[in-house]
Image (tube, rainbow, N blue to C red):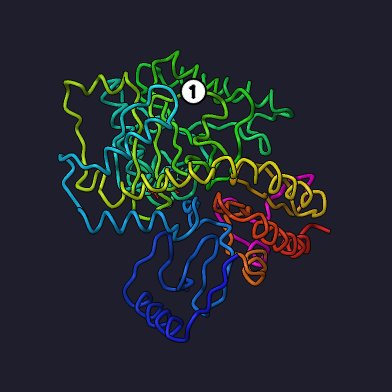
Amino acid sequence: SVNTVITAEQIAAGKVAHDLDREHVFHSWQAQGPFDPMTIIKAEGSWIWDGEGNKLLDLSSQLVNTNIGHQHPKVVAAIQAQAADICTIAPQYVNNARSEAARLIAELTPGDLNRIFFTNGGADANEHAIRMARVHTGRHKVLSAYRSYHGGTHLAVNVTGDPRRVASDNASDGVVHFFPAYPYRSYFNSTTEAEETERALRHLEDTIVLEGPSNIAALILESIPGSCGIYVPPTGYMEGVRQLTRKYGIVFIADEVMAGFGRAGKWFAVNHWNVTPDLLTFAKGVNSGYVPLGGVAISDAIFETFRERVYPGGLTYSGHPLASAAVVATINAMKDEGMVENAARLGADIIGPALEELKAKHPSVGDVRGTGCFWAVELVTNRETREPMAPYGGSSPAMAAVTAALKSGGVLPFVNFNRVHVVPPLNISDEDLRAGLAVLDEALTVADGFVDA
Ligand code: PLP
């Protein structure tokens, strides 16, 4: 663990920043008036320091993106070196950092995903993946799952299947939603995983047939849905989705923006099932968000469509040198330090067993699930009825109390509706992780107080 003294000057500067923020900064996904954001005045490894100088263990990895933790020295140095060399170039020119980043990513992605189109983040990666699929197939419709998140831009928020879509922009643009496999809250009254896989795939095939396969360009699916609940697909589901999309000539886009780059204990979550999508989108963990970057990994067949034909899209900052240098240094650091293997170990040896124990101990825990450093704890007021501790799309006094208990125990948590996600950096120390899980144990005692008598 890290020990740092925060100075009075840092705290004073943080207070000035907070005042300026409230005067001039317009924040994501917030009613601006009541919002009182936390100030972060320092970040290092798995730790951040708030505006009062309190040290908190970052079990959220910010927005599940700092897979290598904060301020990794090799990545900071690589960004500094690139800045001293070339800060920026236009997308049509070749740059060392971009070429090497593309090579490293193409080498890691499964199958024949050999070409990389770079974007500024995850939403625009999904926008471009869908555009590629539409041009490639000459079809328009897009299938996507309820309980999903694909980004905040127009089409990305429309393929999203959570309340952010409804609140933000509900124009369909050819998007059709289907129910995903979600064993804990099965839409198909399944009682086993095998039943869930079989029924969810039958529902998906019916949806394809009823919508007309000849109209469907793409199916976009998070390999493991992240912010909507880290519900790992049951055995056979992803293979089945791959088969159905192949059968009907639909481009399969795996959204690995959150699940990718080691988060799920493998380089990509699709590696858990040996599934190769036609397009794979990424962002976040690719360079831990040190400089914004996302992208699309493209199969040979889709690349061929654009060998002679102009791709109708682009960005000023596609493969930005600072962001690309951060990619190269991040991937190399992850390899050198065995971070993906470590994520798998932390999930199998520490997080998974600890969460199972918490489930046995706390009546407020309905379900625990995950893999690698990618876990959800779903809280309920009644284990029999599985009544969520906060309504879908909302919060509750119970969840607010759980969040407060985590923070006062020294943990920066990721909380969404009735869930607490355990999503630490992949290189968190065993000791810090165990200490964070002990704070979660205490917070769940608070949650138990809200369980139906
Ligand atoms: N897709 C998934 C699965 C995500 O989790 C996110 C962000 O949380 C996005 C896409 C959007 O990425 P960005 O916020 O970089 O646009």
Residue 172 location in percent, x, y?
A: 36, 37
Looking at the magenta stretch, what is its main secondary structure?
loop
- Camera-side residue: 435 or 357? 435
Q: Residue visible at 61% across and 40% down? A: 344
Reading the image, the residue beneath label 1 is: 207
- Camera-side residue: 104 or 363? 104
Residue 85 location in percent, x, y?
A: 21, 54
The residue stretch that appears in magenta: 382-401
Residue furthest to the top: 247
Q: Which amino acid does label 1 sit on?
A: Thr
Residue 218 within the magenta-colored segment of the rendering = no
Residue 388 within the magenta-colored segment of the rendering = yes
Residue 244 location in percent, x, y?
A: 49, 17
Residue 449 location in percent, x, y?
A: 78, 64
Q: Residue visible at 21% across and 36% down? A: 313
Compared across the picture, whether 209 is left or right of 119 comes to: right
Above or below residue 320? Residue 272 is above
Above or below residue 209? Residue 315 is below
Number of marks in the rendered image: 1
Crowding at label 1, few (<14), some or many (≥20) Cα neighbours within 10 Å?
Answer: some
